[in-house]
Amino acid sequence: MTDIDGWRAFLARWSQEWADARDPDAPADERPAGDEEPLRTRRLGFPPASEERIRAVEERLGHRLPPSYRTFLAVSDGWRHAGGFVRLLAGTDQIRRHRGAAGPAEHVPGDLGDQPAPGEELLAGLWHRALRLDVASDAVSVLMDPGDVDADGEWAVYSHASWRASPPERYVSFRAFMEEMYREFHRLQADRSRRAGREFVNETTRALDASVADARLEALRGRYARAEEALTEAIAYGRPRAVGLRDQIRRLLGQTHMMSFHGLAADPLYTPEVLPVLAAEHVSHHRDDSLWPSHPGGALGAVAGTADEILRAVREGRYRYAPEGGFGRAVEEAREQARWGDTDGAWRTLRAALPAWRPVGPEHIAPVGLCADPLLGPLLTPERGRELLATPRAGQRGTAPAPADDLDPPGLAWLTEVDRGQLLSSYRFVLVEAVEPAGLPGRIGADDTTVLNEPMTSWESRRLRRGAGNGAPWEDRALTAVGRAGPGWSFALEPGPRGRFAEKWFVSPGIAASRGTRAVTVWSEPFDGRSGVFHLSVAEDGAQRYAFTVRGTSVDVRGSVPDALAPERLFRADEPRTGRLGERRALEALAAEYGVRLPRLALTRGRLHTFRTLPWNRPPGPGEGRATLRFVRTGRSAGDGEGRGA
């Protein structure tokens, strides 16, 4: 804005709010020096500069001043208390070139190189050509740059404080700089008044607080983007309620940086909802527990005693999100689906129940506690977070969003899309028909006492595999994740097996699993030009029906393989094995033949029950020998290699 009336109204409002915010009971000797006049006149500015004075400054500096600063001078020839750290801004008598004054050399680019970063060229010359506007400040420089001009003739303004240890802040114009300083005044004064036990209230704060209340309703109606915009504006002015509301939106959108919920974690009403979310972030980033809010210096107040227990529950995977009412019942149903791998079904259950969700209090706009649930949190991708936020809830009306796409691809072929070196780039699994996942330990468990472990991630199961011995050197017991593999099927899968497939020793666990039903066993070690294998076998009622193994260019077939799974059709002799094309065709054919699938999200990002299977290798027979060699590299994890002999 460059018109005089707009500047007059803006500066008058700022001055009056500043004067009203001063402590009327403060002794005169405790008031900052120089504030007597602005307090008496209720004006932070000065008399306007005449056109002649402004032109004289322009002649002295050799530049026509930018429109917004020029108009500002015509309203007030300088300004006091621009924000919290600039006590006096220059008028026509004080504005000067920065050249010759000390500059923040640590932020001035040296050799720009062939491809300087955005803004480096402008910043490099700033300190030599800019006009300096700060006259008195707390180590803050305010520079107006005639070399950084936009289409409207406005000069960029830069603010730099050495104590911030960061590059200068850039504003597109003097008007934009002053508007930010006004917001800074509001932020600092709101905090100062709160600490002094006073309320900072004026026409601006009342309007902002009303906009926060409206934003909460907009968020509940599903118009979260509009709500976030209003909350962001209120936060810029230091309205505390807005932070807790916006952080709920940000977290569901996958934004976790600087997330605090602004005191809601210390309120017993909201602690069960938001403190576990903060604990989950603490754990996922491996932060030092001395930084956890329940320790001295934290701000949890009456709930500090429960904070450590919440942190332990989250770290150990014991935390369960438990809202009340119809949505709470849907959460329980969704958790049951998710723990067996049906994450898409779990999300559909939650999505259908979202209109029934109710807040626990007036500062609550969404079921953000879902993010901390070990089984349901992985479902909340940013896309699904947007869908959740766009769904009207808590009795509010609005237009429901289009459902987000399911995340799990059909079938099995997605296994070939895992990058080399990742956990699932090699794998082995057993699919069992007409058996629930909970029944698999009784069929292929390591012994009669085998039970399902609590759900864990694939990386947690990998650490568990490393930390437990596998018995005799020849044994190869898989720690498998279990779940449902489509209608009527269950799976037990081990990502990144430690053992290597060897035809001579291999005994398919699918044979034991197939008692009274059918079972499919697959073992894949991707081909890399030197090694690799793909094995598939099918057993029924305790006996193997057919099997084939592809290693390099050789194919070993046993039994009558159906035409749809014939290895010569799937693994073609005229194409390289390294592209995983044959493996992909084999998995596609297997999925079509038996109507099976594996849940990608649950296996890669979620948590599933696990158990240790019986050995996938037979023991050495009479006259046979087998040795296991362990190679240990200094500073790295141990790797296993096997030497086998007859």
Image (cartoon, rainbow, N blue to C red):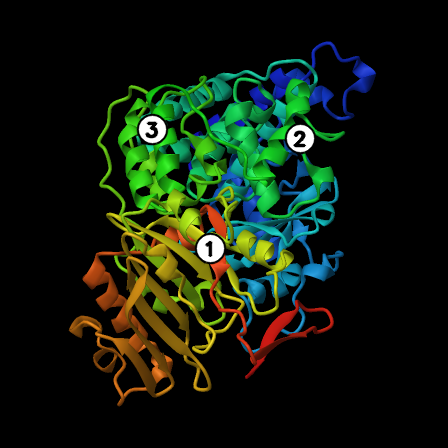
Q: Is residue 380 visible?
A: no
Count neighbours of disc 2 (C-alpha within 10 A) and say few if under 14, some if 14 to 19, many if 20 or more: some
Nearer the observer, 581 or 270:
581
Q: Name the residue under label 1.
A: 480
Q: Are dots 3 and 2 in contact, CB under 8 Å?
A: no
What kind of residue is marked 1?
Answer: Thr
Which residue is outermost to the top?
Answer: 25
Q: Where is residue 471 in the image (x, y as percent from the top left)?
A: 61, 61
Q: Where is residue 281 in the image (x, y as percent from the top left)?
A: 57, 42
What kind of residue is marked 3?
Answer: Ala
> How far separated are the C-alphas under marks 2 and 1?
32 Å
Q: Are dots 2 and 1 in contact, CB under 8 Å?
A: no
For marks 2 and 1 on the same chain, the one whose residue lies earlier in the sequence: 2
- The residue depicted at 63 percent of the width and 18 percent of the height is 21
Which residue is outermost to the left?
Answer: 563
For marks 3 and 2 on the same chain, the one whose residue lies earlier in the sequence: 2
Q: Quarter-wise, where is residue 472 in the image? A: bottom right
Q: Quarter-wise, where is residue 640 in the image? A: bottom right
Q: What element carries label 3?
A: helix
594 is higher (above) or lower (below) than 281: below
Q: In this view, does 83 lie to the left or right of 394?
A: right
Q: Name the residue under label 2.
A: 308
Q: Where is residue 487 in the image (x, y as percent from the top left)?
A: 24, 48
- Location of the N terminus (image quadrant): top left
For marks 3 and 1 on the same chain, the one whose residue lies earlier in the sequence: 3
User: Which numbered marker is on residue 98?
Assistant: none
What kind of residue is marked 2?
Answer: Asp
> How far separated are the C-alphas under marks 3 and 2?
28 Å
Q: Name the residue under label 3.
A: 330
Q: Is residue 325 visible?
A: yes
- The residue depicted at 76 percent of the width and 13 percent of the height is 26
Q: What element carries label 1?
A: strand
